[in-house]
Amino acid sequence: MTDADPGTLPTKAIGFAEYGGLDVLRPIEIEVPAPGAGQVRIAVRAAGVNPLDHKVRSGSITEFFPVTFPAVTGYEVAGVVEAVGEDVTAWQVGDEVFGAVHGGGYAEHVLATADKLARKPAGLGWEQAAAIPVAAETAWRSLDLLAVEPGGTLLVHGAAGGVGTILLQFARQRGIRVIGTASEANHPHLRDLGAVPVVYGDGLAGRVRAAAPEGVDRVLDAAGLGGVLPLSVELAGGAENVLAIADWQGAAEHGVRFTGGTEPADYQGPALAGALALFEGDGLVLPLHRVYPLAEAAEAQRESEGGHVRGKIVLTVG
Ligand SMILES: NC(=O)c1ccc[n+]([C@@H]2O[C@H](COP(=O)([O-])OP(=O)(O)OC[C@H]3O[C@@H](n4cnc5c(N)ncnc54)[C@H](OP(=O)(O)O)[C@@H]3O)[C@@H](O)[C@H]2O)c1
């Protein structure tokens, strides 16, 4: 038997030891190591819940997102820096930060890469801060990859979720006109963000043409549902004008680019800066659909899996 590494910290988490349904999620204890080069350890106050979490837990995306067990999902957090790697100068113990992490967010402590974090303004709540990083990075990356010109028209499938809600605000800043699909109940939300809402489902192409008689320049499929890629390719005048973030199989089938965040460019830094600029300017709109304590992470994932989140679901920790 060897002595425990004095740098590791026993940490309460909600994790799983096998792929499966919500019932595989259990309270577990994990060992979080001392931060290495370029890392900080964060005492987590809140963790964002994303559809990625339940997809990873169910085992439906193991071919490009395998995990080792016991696994702890949670890819964005807000919290307090409690230890820094020896080469880290940007952060000090006690700093309040938020940002993306490589899993492990459903826990009281997590390791983070120092340059993936931003300082949390005092006026930004823990839950609100934890809701930002994944949606903001994805939205920023999608807009950059789509390269919509100012004055151009973008159709967004699934505009009322976490990614869509932030993307609409970044798009407005860039002078892009957005047609967004959502259920009727979310149309006021989309209108408040400057988008033109249309209902998804049968007859969608006709509704989009009515909303944008001059046509759409680009399409983002942020829903990955309902087989919308063929009509998207037609509306945008070619597969090269369409980007998918959820339906990778459909994207491959229809010659559409899929982005999973593996591009070499850093989108996280500009995205967090962009979200903070909104927060400090006209205001960042990111409704908290529901907030759960960490112990109810399974309920949070049940809600997320239902597919009708407006804004974000967040877990409070500690
Ligand atoms: N590739 C990447 O890098 C990346 C990064 C982040 C997220 N994602 C993926 O992108 C997707 C969206 O993420 P998210 O965080 O925005 O999800 P979310 O917050 O759970 O949003 C779900 C939204 O989808 C809408 N929706 C449900 N059925 C729809 C349909 N048939 N057509 C259009 N919209 C529909 C819902 O609106 P209504 O309630 O109005 O129906 C809801 O607002 C997820 O599949 C996620 O895994 C990928």
Image: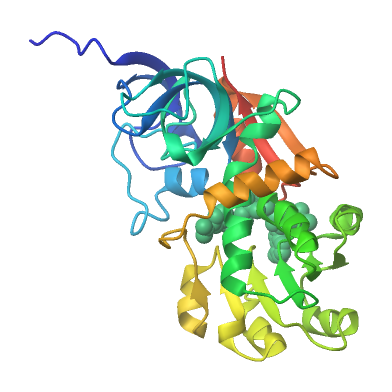
Residue in the image at 77% along x and 40% along y: 279
Q: Is residue 287 visible?
A: no
Q: How is the image coloured?
A: rainbow
Asked where in the image residue 19 lies, by quadrant, the reply is top left
Quarter where residue 232 is shown = bottom right
Q: Is residue 138 above or below residue 201?
A: above
Residue 289 position in % (x across, y down): 75, 38
Q: Nearer the viewer, residue 21 or 176?
A: 176
Is 63 situated left or right of 159 in this image? left
- Residue 52, compared with residue 237, is above or below; it is above
The answer to whether 157 appears left or right of 98 in the picture is right
Image quarter in which the N terminus is found: top left
Compared with residue 151, is residue 55 higher up or lower down, i.e. above or below? above
- Asked whether 302 or 181 is in front, the reply is 181
Residue 263 in the image, given as x and y percentages of width and height: 43, 63
Residue 165 in percent (x, y) is at 74, 53
Q: Which residue is painted at 19% across and 11% down in the image?
A: 4
